[in-house]
Image (tube, coloured by chain):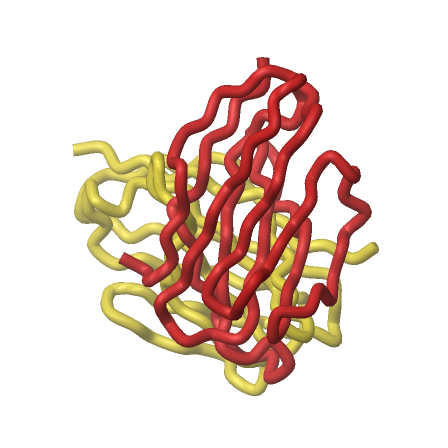
Amino acid sequence: ETGVTQTPRHLVMGMTNKKSLKCEQHLGHNAMYWYKQSAKKPLELMFVYSLEERVENNSVPSRFSPECPNSSHLFLHLHTLQPEDSALYLCASTKDPVAGYNEQFFGPGTRLTVL
Amino acid sequence: GESVGLHLPTLSVQEGDNSIINCAYSNSASDYFIWYKQESGKGPQFIIDIRSNMDKRQGQRVTVLLNKTVKHLSLQIAATQPGDSAVYFCAENQGGKLIFGQGTELSVKP
């Protein structure tokens, strides 16, 4: 186990639904990340939070809305998604994002299917 | 933009043989690289890392080589085992942001 947990592990939702993905890290890290992993494509960085402030938003559509209430928890709120949003959504954390030599620890991901 | 990529999408090796997975990067300013392993149904798992002031780093059964002249990174797995079957990613760390390659799928034949 990496110390990063994600729930749910699988989610099927319709295009009109609203759902949320949850990530929790038990490592005392200061930065958390959301990635999207689609088949045959590299991991795509979506959002970065450092000390609970959003420091990166990689041109992600507004139907994805992140929330970081504290340094241990990260949410991704989903609404009116499209079928092409179906993917594995990965959460990661790192101790000190500025240092540059810190590996990121990943959760197991949430497999999202949009019907 | 600059990117990190892998030479081969799939690699098949015989159990017990050594595996070599390659990665090309294009950002000469990057100073830290990581190899991750991702098994089916799991998130990426850290294997080994290397800083740009090093050419080689060894772990348990794994070795990472860095050739800055040609911007090439490789992961060597000694005595490959069935449990090594997974997708392997190299990643370039830029100020806390990881830029990933597409991944190489390693399959181990018994």
**As displayed, is residue B53 above or below residue A4?**
below
Residue B22 lies, with reference to residue B33, above or below; the image says above
Please tell me which residue lies in front, B31 or A24.
Answer: A24
Q: Is residue B82 above or below residue B78?
A: above
The x, y position of residue B66, in whole percent, is 54, 71
Quadrant of residue B23 within the rendered picture: bottom right
Residue drawn at x 46%, y 66% is A72
Q: Which chain is red?
A: A
- Residue in the picture at 42% in, 51% down: B44
Seen from the viewer's position, the closer of residues A74 and A94 is A74
How many numbered dots are placed on residues in this image?
0
The quadrant holding residue A84 is top right
Residue displayed at 66% across by 18% down: A16
Question: The N terminus of chain B lies in which quarter of the figure?
Answer: bottom right
Image coordinates for residue B10, horizontal then vertical, percent: 46, 35
Point out the image quarter for the C terminus of chain B. Answer: top left
User: From where the camera sits, is residue B20 visible?
Assistant: no
Residue B71 lies left or right of residue B74; in this view the side is right
Q: Is residue B82 left or right of residue A82?
A: left
Q: Colour of chain B?
A: yellow
Residue at (42, 57) in percent of width and height: A24
Q: Is residue A8 visible?
A: yes
User: Residue B88 at what x, y percent from top left?
Assistant: 44, 48
Is residue A18 or residue A106 the one in the foreground? A18
Q: x, y percentage for residue A38? A: 58, 33
Residue most extreme to the top: A115
